Image: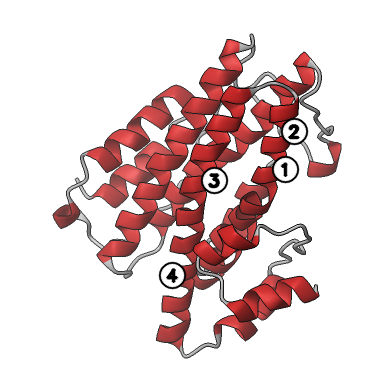
Amino acid sequence: MNPRQRALEVLCLRDPTTKAFETRALFAGLDTSLIAPATRFDVPAELPGRPDKPALLPPRQVPSRTPFTPEGKAALVHAIAHIEFNAINLALDAAFRFADMPVAFYVDWLRVASEEALHFSLLREHLQSVGHDYGDFDAHDGLWLMTQRTAGNVVARMALVPRTLEARGLDATPPLQAKFARAGDQRMVEILDVILRDEVGHVAIGNHWYRWLCERGGLDPVAHYAELALRYEAPKLRPPFNWPAREAAGFTADEMARLNAG
């Protein structure tokens, strides 16, 4: 089977345990010779497949979470797990949706999906260790909403999902680790170490393919990014920024200077 077809099938799975397992299995058994870049797929009406819970609310209606109470800690772990579950979906979506890209593009996004599935599984296991499970708390759908908005434009997808929304995770993770450390949750600090390490690579993949697409289309990456951010209503990025992680993920000095200038 074309691995891109399988990516779509796994994207449609609703059960989180099955989706995480099958996502990792897809990459572990990947035969790149079967990837068919030219294939275009009929897109199901309802994507992605996901469980009935958590309930999805507008972002501003989801309460803030603190790790300094047992319930608050569980809610914060759940919020991060929800981000990682959505990240599985967006990587699978990139792998099936965008035709006529190099084989390496699909390999990259299937690798990302597999690593996001690992992150989700680690977070879910930790959540279960404190008496909760994925779906116990309300969540929002911001990451997937941008995935939907950019469904028809691979350049916008690369610009605004991995290198914008996911890159925010590079900035947010060290402060989160500090909070969990103060709350005495060393396991969560360790899990976030794994996530941060892998997310640098994921953002780098987004940067690579965004620049590749801009070069192919004769576009200036910096100027075009500003246009896309405005057109698709991307959130404005605010400090503090994790400069070492952003540099490792391939952001240029010019891009980081523009971030710093606001």
Q: CA distance from mark 2 to mark 3?
A: 15 Å
Real-space Cα distance between discs 4 and 3? Answer: 18 Å
Question: Quadrant of the image for the N terminus?
Answer: top left
What secondary structure is found at the residue carrying circle 4?
A: helix
Which part of the image, by quadrant, shows the C terminus?
bottom right
The quadrant where residue 79 appears: top right
User: Considering only order in the chain, which callout, 3 or 2, is on the residue closer to the N terminus?
Assistant: 2
- Helix, strand or loop under label 1: helix
Indicate which disc, 4 or 3, sits on the residue closer to the N terminus: 3
**In the figure, residue 36 lies in which quadrant?**
bottom left
Q: For the residue marked with disc 4, what is the amino acid?
A: His
Check disc 3: other Cα within 10 Å, few if <14, some if 14-19, many if 20+: some
Left or right: residue 148 versus residue 207 is right
The label on residue 179 is 2
Q: Which residue is mark 3?
A: 196
Residue under label 4, please give it.
Answer: 208
Q: Which residue is mark 1?
A: 175
Residue 106's spot in the image, x, y percent? Answer: 32, 58
- Distance Cα–Cα, label 4 vs label 2: 32 Å
Amino acid carrying label 3: it is: Leu
